[in-house]
Image (cartoon, rainbow, N blue to C red):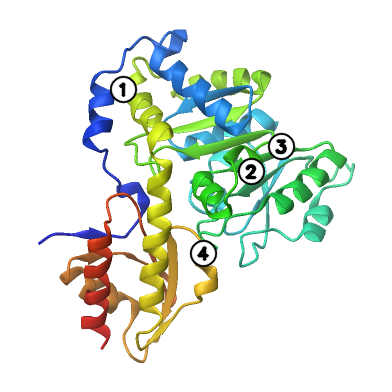
Amino acid sequence: MEIIDLRSDTFTQPSDEMRAAIAAAPLGDDVFDEDPTVNALQEKAARLLGKEKALLVSSGTMGNLVSILAHCERGSEVIVGDQSHTFYYEAGGVSVYGGIHSRQLANREDGTLALEELRAAIRPGDIHFPVTRLICLENTHNRCFGTPLNRDYLQAVADIVRRHRLKLHIDGARIFNAAVSLNRPVSDLADMADSVTFCLSKGLSAPVGSVICGDAEFIEKARRIRKSLGGGMRQAGIIAAGGLYALESGIEQIRKDHDHARRLAEELVKLPGIRLDLQKVSTNIVYFDVDKKLISPLQLVKRMARQGVRFFDTGGTRLRLVTHSGVTSADISKAIKAFQAVLI
């Protein structure tokens, strides 16, 4: 049976053209800063995001960890959202490896943190409290409907950061999705941040890797931390080549992914037992709720899997679908028919 995998955009596969680029990539030793393909990727990433320098890392989790370690000291505090990937899915790494205290504020439905709550959360200069060093945002926000954070909001947070002499890190795992959705250059969503990470292995469809971007001094510190975490890679151009190809040719695919997510959502909302707010579908992620009186989330997941469509139950009555380069327009049609067969 052919499988339509809507579990995550991490399930993307490299195209034949990307595989050819990987096979042909010139290589060197990146620990010695001598891999030409890695250097080309880092230079392109920095240029696209409007930063001085960039650094290839193995994953988005490593990118966030390295960035937070570079900004904070042991015993200091980072402010994060309570639905953020950094807090929710990264194994407590900032505390485990950095001795950094995290202060969680409630994410609103659009992924933002209330500005007044941010201001109130910044610690006063009192020896009883950890010292606030960093605010982290996520763009797009995975658990908050895949919502993009717009420039005005990012600038408002950056103004708070500057006023209090803090740093701002953006977990931009899907920041190219945000840029496409908002119809803005990705640099417009990054230039006010001190550091930004983005994933190569989600919507950009490369097999491995993420990139950290920032100023030269920050990236030099991040490079040392990456090495201490075991993240120094040798002929890493094998990884970088896929990312470089993606940055040169993959943005149009993200537009298709958004169109597919929208089409899927528009058909799902017509089905019995489905609750879905179309206004909250703005990128490649579709969250919906199911009426348990009709079918439980687990039953729906299992029955759809038997139809060849995979996706996740995220807890309670909520489920998530994610479109990506491995899902075609024809696949969307098949998935819609499968939902209809199960629910009608």
Q: Dots 2 and 4: beta carbons under 8 Å?
A: no
Give how far across and how far down residue 45 sits, in percent: 52, 28
| Dot placed on the residue nearer the N-terminal end, 1 or 4 | 4
Q: CA distance from mark 3 to mark 2?
A: 30 Å
Say which amino acid is labelled 1: Ile
Q: Position of residue 237 (x, y in %)?
A: 35, 19
> What is the secondary structure assignment of the residue under circle 4?
loop
Residue that badge 1 annotates: 238
Q: Is residue 109 above or below residue 267?
A: above
Q: Can you tell which of label 1 and label 2 is closer to the viewer?
A: 2
Secondary structure state at the residue bearing disc 2: helix
Q: Residue at x 42, y 13 (%)?
A: 30
Q: Are the two marked residues, 4 and 3, in contact with CB atoms closer than 8 angstroms?
A: no
Q: Which residue is mark 2?
A: 189
Report if residue 164 is visible in the image: no
Q: What amino acid is found at the position of numbered circle 2 in the picture?
A: Leu
Camera-near label (1 vs 3) is 1
**Which is more N-terminal, label 3 or label 1?**
3
Q: Please tell me how crowded label 2 is: few (under 14), some (14-19), or many (20+) other residues with Cα within 10 Å.
A: many
Query: How much space separates mark 2 and mark 4, taking CA atoms?
Result: 18 Å
Task: Estimate the x, y position of residue 77 in percent, counting from the top left.
Answer: 72, 42
Q: Amino acid at mark 3?
A: Gly
Of the two numbered discs 3 and 2 in the rendering, the one whose residue sits closer to the viewer: 2
CA separation, marks 1 and 4? 33 Å
The residue that disc 4 covers is 145
Question: How dense is the environment of label 4, judged by Cα within 10 Å: few (below 14), some, or many (20 and up)?
Answer: many
Q: Is residue 231 above or below residue 209?
A: above
